[in-house]
Amino acid sequence: MDNKENLQNKRIGIIGAGPSGLAQIRAFEALKERGENIPEIVCFEKQSNWGGMWNYSWRTGVGKYGEPIHGSMYKYLWSNGPKECLEFSDYSFDDHFEKAISSYPPRPVLFDYIEGRIKKSNAREYIRFDTTVRWVSYDEDTRKFTIVLDDLKINKTYSEEFDYLVVASGHFSTPNMPYFKGIETFSGNVMHAHDFRGADQFKDRNILLIGSSYSAEDIGIQCYKHGAASVTLSYRSNPIGHDWPQGIKEVPLVTHFDGDTAFFKDGTSEDYDAVIMCTGYQHKFPFLPDELRLKTKNNLYPDNLYKGIFYNNLPQLIYLGMQDQYYTFNMFDTQAWLARDFMMERLELPSEGERRVDIDTWLDRNSKLQSSFDDVDFQTYYIKDLLSFTDYPHFNLDKIAAMFKEWLQDKEENILTYRDKTYQSVVTGTMAEAHHTDWMDELDDSKERYLYGAEEEELIPE
């Protein structure tokens, strides 16, 4: 059997049709467009549509079929980084919207952009929606994965075999929910950021957010923007440290609650109407046995992944998008292109021992990072390393790194206005247009309002 025949008989399973899973499909489609044969690809998505986190759901807890809700998106979420830093190099924002738009679009606009690229291909034919993975096993003799699946629509359990398995299920869906003494006596809303669906319900209320992550920063600003009476952010180690407007403040970590009163490490206390835990997420893969499961916390370079992708003990098992992220869509693409070339048998990996040395080198570099600028440079260098192995269309990473650093400074200067800044695309050279309304005054996040403005509603296309 020649190599082409061998490849056509291979089967590739992908778990998740979010940005990472779609990137993997797109990587293979790029070969198909050049007239090349590709293996059989099957992608399993437990939601009813693609997009992963960007596929907004009003539901919390469980979905239509009783499965835990995957998404953590909420109404009024706008990109918290310049779109120019995440642009696909093979499908620009100009390609999609056919006009310049602002650098910080709302979620529906970014979802539309993600869909735009994938709709131009036959990607949907590879995806089985409303299908969840229950269990994965690997047979050393046959060198195949067996995946146990549930078709949620018809309540049917079945299994299939694959030669390669790509885990692209993300790591921002299983909340890390801490306990504070007395929290059970709090009479108001207590939720995790995962279940936050919009700031409307917190208008005129005093809100306590526990955590100092990007989600705490953004949910705090959203609640302030949409009329919360006050917003308090409680940090464990270090404050976020922005020059907050009146109505937002930072305090040390909560020690305990007594009824609706929260007590803090600095000896102060205050009454609140709601508590939102912005305390991060767990890397959770309940469908994988212990020997195949990635075990890590959120960081820029998880251990045991060669090139941040291939599970070192078994490189046929591929993880996409498992890093903490400055870069997003374009990083997932570079990972997916490299993974594709390995699965197409165009890339030969070094020995397990050599891979271990490479992983340790990256871990050592990671351990020495001291600032956000260092983090940006680290992830930039990481993507450059991936690009050196693939034919993914190159893009100017140095300019994107400079944009990230400018973005970090913009936030320091004014956390309320940084989304009004504009940047230049490294893919097309197009300079972003300023949005028709200042971000703090824009209370409508719909695609129609964003693209056409209220004064042109009669011109909105069908």
Image (cartoon, rainbow, N blue to C red):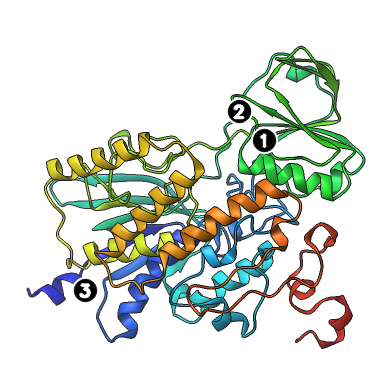
How far apart marks 2 and 3 lie (CA) works out to 53 Å
- Looking at the image, residue 134 sits to the left or right of residue 388; the answer is right
Mark yes or no: residue 44 visible.
Answer: no
Give residue 106's quadrant in the image: bottom right
SS of the residue under disc 1:
loop
Nearest the viewer among 290 and 318 is 318
User: Is residue 48 shown above or below 405?
Assistant: below
* Image depth: mark 1 or mark 3 in front: 1
Q: Which residue is drawn at 18% across and 40% down?
A: 357
Q: Mark 2 sits on what residue?
A: 238
Can you tell which of label 2 and label 3 is closer to the viewer? 2
Residue at disc 3, secondary structure: helix
Percent from the top left, x then y, of residue 168? 42, 54
Q: What residue type is disc 3 on? A: Gln
User: Where is the C terminus found, in terms of image quarters?
Assistant: bottom right
Name the image quarter holding residue 98. bottom right
> Spatial distance from mark 1 to mark 3, Cα to Cα?
55 Å
Q: Distance between the residues labelled 1 and 2?
A: 8 Å
Residue 393 percent coordinates (x, y): 36, 74
Q: Is mark 2 on a helix, strand or loop?
A: loop
Foreground of the two, 49 or 182: 182
What amino acid type is highlighted by mark number 2?
A: Asn
In the figure, 252 relative to 267: above or below? Answer: below
Query: Badge 2: few (under 14), some or many (20 or more) residues near its Cα, within 10 Å?
Result: few
Mark 3, residue position: 8
Evaluate if marks 1 and 2 touch, with contact meaning CB atoms under 8 Å apart. yes
Q: Mark 1 points at which residue?
A: 241
